Image: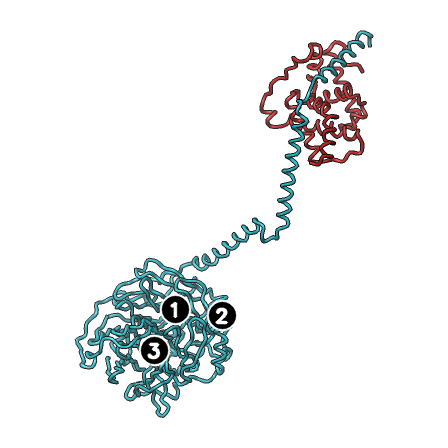
Amino acid sequence: MEHKEQAEFAELLQKYSAMVLRIAFSNVKNLQDAQDIAQDVFMSVLTKQPHFDSEEHEKAWLIRVTINRCKNHVKSFWNRRTEGLSEDLSYMPKEETGVMEAVLALPQNYRNVIYLHYYEGYSINEISEILHKKPATVGTWLARGRAALKNTLKGGFDE
Amino acid sequence: MKPEENHRSRENIDRYRAAMDHLRLPEDFEQRTLELAKQHMECTKGKQSSRDIWRAKPFYRRPAAQVCFVLLLFLVIGIFPVLHFTQPFLATRSNDSAAVTQYDGGENGALCGGVPSGPVSGEIERTDGTAEAANASEIPTENSASSANSPETASAPAAGAGIEEQAFLADPDEPAEKRSRNTIPGDGTMDTDTGLPSDESVPSPSQPQLFQENGAASAQSGQNTGEDSAQTPAPSALLRSAPENAYEEPGLPLVASDGEKLYFQPYPSQKNGGSLMVWDGTALSSTGISHADSLIAVNGGYSYTIENKLYHGSSLVRDFSDEALLGTHAFSLRVFGSDSSYFYLYANAADSVSGEVSPYAILRVSLDGQAEQLLFGADGLSTGGRISQAILAENTVYYSLSAGNSGIYALDSAGGQPRQLSSMSVSGSFCYWNGELIFTDTGTNLCAMQSESGSNRQLVEGGVLSPPVVRGGTVYYSAKSPNAATGAIYAYDLAGGESRRLLEEQGTAGGFCQLLPASDGLFLVNASGDVFHYHIQTGILTEIT
């Protein structure tokens, strides 16, 4: 690997590794699996060497690839035939653990739009572009996610 | 939304973000990913380089192509023998004839070809196309010793000069009616004027399909300028168009000699009812066998075929009558040679028409008749013909095709593809001596051909009446006497290249048309089936029969 490529890759890791890990965790609900998926996503960057028009394009590509990898992982034979250990969230404060558990209890699509909207700050239209879904669909997922969280969390997530 | 709920909602969102911020990658994640990426890139480069190398290879050097080629080669090699060996075996009957005699065991260990005869099988032909069942009851009988001892025959010396192995084969193309029409009148004389072959040239029926050595063709064209291959009559056609050759006359006995003993089966209408006789130098005895259609002297005894059954003495070695050596074609089997392990035979299509390419087969069978090996089988399409003569010498089968791809061929005694030595046509039998095949061609010339290269030289030009016999480096043959109407026995010295007259054929019925080597001289057979012994040193001619 050239030094230039190595530096660019290190920058990419520093910039997006945390985001990729969070998205992966939201989907697979397991930190170890999320770390493996994150590494897999960055390896795919190296192997495919995609051309990005902008930084937003690069970020959106990583989000989409991460979600797809997670879906593949969830659908994988190994994941379906085995029962993984429940994630230990004891390292988090008790209040944060309750919110995280409530979010992780949502369906996968709801979790993704909750994360993208409330953590990454994307609007419904932006999320629809990233996920290649209709804005109405994304809006529905977001509304249903909020409604579900309102039932489990006192106050829920605001609109 | 109430302010309290709004506040709660903000808190939940902040807690969610804080919980997400607690997620951490391992500290060495970046380093491990970089190392993994390096390994991956190196692996990819290695694959790419090997792929480039593979693509740079020519097609025939690619392993897959080589494997395919080898498989294809095995397939091709495997298919042809299978095609030859898996022809359906159908019962066949023989009604053709060929007389085979062979001398083996001369002092010089040489070999010699045969004199044609062939009237015997005419006796067993059936008009409905089927052959008479083998006369098994009358074939293997005890030899009845004859008490006739003549002073001349009793004085036969033990060993003479070197004698070449010889196999005399009758051309089986001759139909029975043709043979009877061409029978020499029994007045005791042979019309030597008509004994010469016709000058009419019959075009060769087809070009040889098997590979031919260039040397053979060039030698032939160089030395036989008057007999180029295009003008050489096909033997089968010649045998029909010019049956006046003395040695092609019907009514000749079937003879074989090992130098000491003479085996002969007279023509049934001539002597002893056609029973196979043995002359051991002192006495003549009958074996009780009749209707043999080929005969060789071998291993101190004799072997013969009768209606596709191979016998050695009184024992049946192998019955081929129920085997389909030529697929669906009926065949006629002839034995022409033997070594310490095998009998060598050939099979011609019994229903073949002269001039047509017919299937034939050359095979060998173990002395006990258990193991059989097809040495070569002509399919009758690309290769084929009719074997008129064959001889086993120096682990090689030399044979002459009289139809189809006519010519002289050499085939390894273990099998394989035959090698065409010449496109010449052989009349009668040929002998083998010191790497040369000696024979009479269809132009009645005495020729010698190198068995390896096929180069040909003419020993005697024209007028030769009998197939030659070689004994101790001297070729003996019967030829028309230049100053007389009768023929004479001549001796041609292969080393000196000169020919001398040995014996005038006076007082012998029809002239001598078959010669066989004896340890002290020659056995001579005339057209009437009378057999004589000629002592070379003393010049005494003794009638055996």
Mark 3 burial class by Cα count in 10 Å: few <14, some 14-19, many 20+: many
Same chain for mark 2 and mark 3? The answer is: yes
Distance (Cα) linking label 1 and label 3: 45 Å
Q: Which mark is residue A51?
A: none
The chain carrying label 2 is B
For discs 1 and 3, the disc positioned in front in the rendered view: 3
Are dots 1 and 3 in contact, CB under 8 Å?
no
Q: Which residue is mark 2?
A: B212
The chain carrying label 3 is B
Q: Amino acid at mark 2?
A: Gln
**Badge 2 element:** loop
Q: Position of residue B4 (x, y in %)?
A: 80, 7
| Chain letter for the cyan colouring in the rendering | B
Q: In which quadrant of the rendered view does residue B371 lie?
A: bottom left
Q: Position of residue B139 (x, y in %)?
A: 26, 67
Q: Which residue is mark 3?
A: B473
